Image (cartoon, helix red, strand yellow):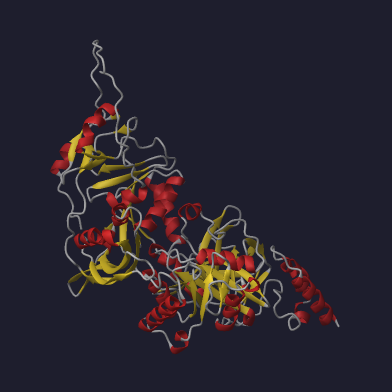
Amino acid sequence: MVGQLLRSLWSTAAASKSSNYKPYALSGFTRLFSSATAAAAPSAALGGVVNPSLLRNVAVIAHVDHGKTTLMDRLLRQCGADIPHERALDSISLERERGITISSKVTSISWKENELNMVDTPGHADFGGEVERVVGMVEGAVLVVDAGEGPLAQTKFVLAKALKYGLHPILLLNKVDRPSVTEERCDEVETLVFDLFANLGATEEQLGFPVLYASAKEGWASSTYTKCPPDDAKNMSDLLDAIIRHVPPPAASLDAPLQMLVSMMERDNYVGRILTGRITSGILHVGDKVHGLHSTDSGIVKIEEGKVVKLMKKKGTSIVAVDSAGAGDIVSMAGLNKPVIGHTIASVEVMTALPTVELDPPTISMTFGVNDSPLAGRDGTYLTGKQIGDRLMAEAERNLAINVLPGTSDSYEVQGRGELQLGILIENMRREKFELSVSPPKVMYKTENRQKLEPVEEVTIEVNEEHVGIVMEALSHRRGEITDMGPVPGHVGRTRLCLTCPSRGLVGYRSVFNSVTRGTGFMHRAFLNYEKYRGPLGNVRKGVLVSMGYGTITAHALMSLEPRGILFVKPGMETYDGMIIGEHSRDQDLDVNPAKSKELNNIRAANKDENVKLTPPRLITLEEAIGYVASDELIEVTPNAIRLRKKYLEVNKRKTMSKRPKD
C-alpha cells in the first residue's frame, strides 16, 4: 500500500518536472522511504543514489568546430534544461570570446527513466589532455563528424583515446542540412570513419557502431538520412534513444566499499577544493569519513583524511546539492584539500588506489620568469617569482597536461602540448594582474638508441587553389612532408593537403598561414608521434628593429623608420633599450632610435609642420608573439601590454653573447 502511494506520488512529480529539475526536490521525502520505493521507482534519484543500470556515462568527442558544444545545447534543451544563451557549457570567459572549448565539462540530463551523465570535451589538439583524463569516467562516446569535412586530424586523436579505453562510440554525422552534403557524401564519410576505426584497432563490437544524421544548429537528429525531417521529428530523441540502447550501463556495485577516482578539480572560495569524478564502487554520503590515496613506486600513500562536507551534481545548467550518490555516478565533493587529479577518494578502511589515466607527454616548453624590463611594475599586482611559481603550481594541479619545473633565478619551465595551450595560461595570468617574462617555445626532444627524436604532428590544410604553391613552399622550409593531396569534396576550387611536420616547424606558422591565405584557409593539427630529427629549419623569419632609446615613441622618428620594415608600435607608446619595435626588411637585426624628437628652432616656414601620415602598425597579439620571438628574445607580458624584447637589453652585451641555436 505504501509502495503504491509513493509510486503514484513519484509519477505525478516526474510528469510535471520542469527545466529546474523539480523531481529532485523530493529527495528528502524519498530518503525516508528508500527501502520501500527502491523497487517501485527504480529511476528515481533516492537521496541522490541512482540505480547503476539506469545510468549512462557518455562523452561527446570531435574535431574542433564540428559542433560538439552546439549539440550539447540541443540535448540540454530537449531534456528540459533552461539554456540562458548559446554554448551554455562554455563557462570560461576565454571560451566564449574565442568560440572554442578549453576544459571538459560534465552535466547530467534525464531521458525517460534514465540518467545521462554527459561530458563535453575540447576539440583542439592542444587541449587533448582534457579528453584523456575524462574518457576513464564514461562507457560510451558520441563521435561528432562534420558530414562535409569528414574525419580530420583531431578526430583520429580523440577516437584513438576512446577505443583504447574500450568505449562504444556512436557516429553522428553533423551538418547534413548543408546544400553541399548529399547522401552519397554521407556514405563516403561513413566509409572513411569505418576505415579509421579499423586502422586504430577497433574490436568487432566497436566496428558495429550505429550511425545517425543530425543538424545540431537546427536541433534535430535522425536514425535515417534526411535533409529536413517532419516537424514532429525535429528533436534529439533518436540520438538520446541510441545512447540508451548502445551505451552499456557502468559496471558498479553499491554494496562494495567506496572508491572514486578524481578526474577534475576546481576551487571554491567557501568550501575549498572541489573534486569531481566517477564513483567506482559503494555509496558516498555527506558526512562520511574518507581519505585520499595515491599510488607510488614504493606503495600506496595516504594523503589526507577528512569528512565529506558537501556533495554536488551538475543537472542541466544548475548545480544541485545531494545527500548521497552511488556507484557509477559522476559527482563533485568537498571536504579534502590535498588530493588532486589522479588520486583516489575511498572509505577509511580501503587502502587500494584506482589506476590513473595515462597522458601523452608534453611536446613544447616555455620559461616563465620575473619581468625585469625598465617598464616593469607599472601595470601588474603580482610581480615576484614566488607569486608566479605558486600560480603555475596551482595550474599544474588542475591540468595534468601541464608540467611545471623550477628553474634558476625565480624562473619556471612550463611544459605543455602546444603554444595555444600555454598562450591560454599566459592570458589568464595577465587577466589576474600578473606581470612576467616568457621565453619562446622550445620543442622537447627525446633520445632513443643514441638517435635524436622530435615530436611530429599530423596537419590537414584546406586552401584555395591559388594559395597551394605558397603554402607548400613555406611548409617545405619547415620540414613538412606531404602525405596526401586532392580536391575538397563539394567545394570547387579548394584543395586539401595532408602532411606531417615537426612541432618546431609549426610554431608561429598559423598567423603566417592566415595572412598568406587572406583568412580563407583552414589548418588543423594533432600530435602524431616522435620521429627521427628532420634537420634544421629554413629561414622562416627576418630580422627585427631593436630600440636603442628610452622614452616616448615619436611620430617624427617612426616616419624615418617606416621604409626599414614593418612597425609594431605607434606614437605615444613607451620604449626602452633592447625593446623590439618592428620587423626589419632584411635578415639581420637593426638598432634604431624610435624616441628621437624633431629639433626645434625659431624659424617657421610654410608646409614645415605638416601632419605626419604613418601606416597603421602591426600590433602583436599574445598568440602571434609566442610564435614570433626567436631564441634570443623574450615576451614581456603585463595586464595592459604585450611587448617583445631582446633577452639581453644592452647592445654591447648582445653583440658579445653567442646566440642559442634556433632549433
Farthest residue to the top: give it.
602
Relative vertical location of residue 199 with respect to residue 660 in this rendering, above or below: below
Relative vertical location of residue 603 with respect to residue 249 in this rendering, above or below: above
Relative vertical location of residue 540 with respect to residue 292 in this rendering, above or below: above
Which quadrant is home to the N terminus?
bottom right
Which quadrant holds residue 244? Answer: bottom right
Of residues 502 and 413, which is closer to you in this image? 502
Q: Position of residue 590 (x, y in %)?
A: 17, 39
Which quadrant is home to the C terminus?
bottom left
Farthest residue to the bottom: give it.
204
Q: Residue at x 46, y 59 (%)?
A: 100
Q: Residue at x 35, y 37 (%)?
A: 376
Q: How many marks?
A: 0
Farthest residue to the right: give it.
1
Q: Position of residue 102 (x, y in %)?
A: 46, 60
Q: Position of residue 282 (x, y in %)?
A: 61, 78
Q: Is residue 156 visible?
A: yes
Q: Is residue 284 visible?
A: no
Q: Is residue 449 left or right of residue 638?
A: left
Q: Is residue 89 left or right of residue 298?
A: right
Q: Is residue 26 left or right of residue 242?
A: right
Of residues 159 and 335, which is closer to you in this image? 159
Q: Position of residue 545 (x, y in %)?
A: 22, 39
Q: Is residue 384 left or right of residue 4?
A: left
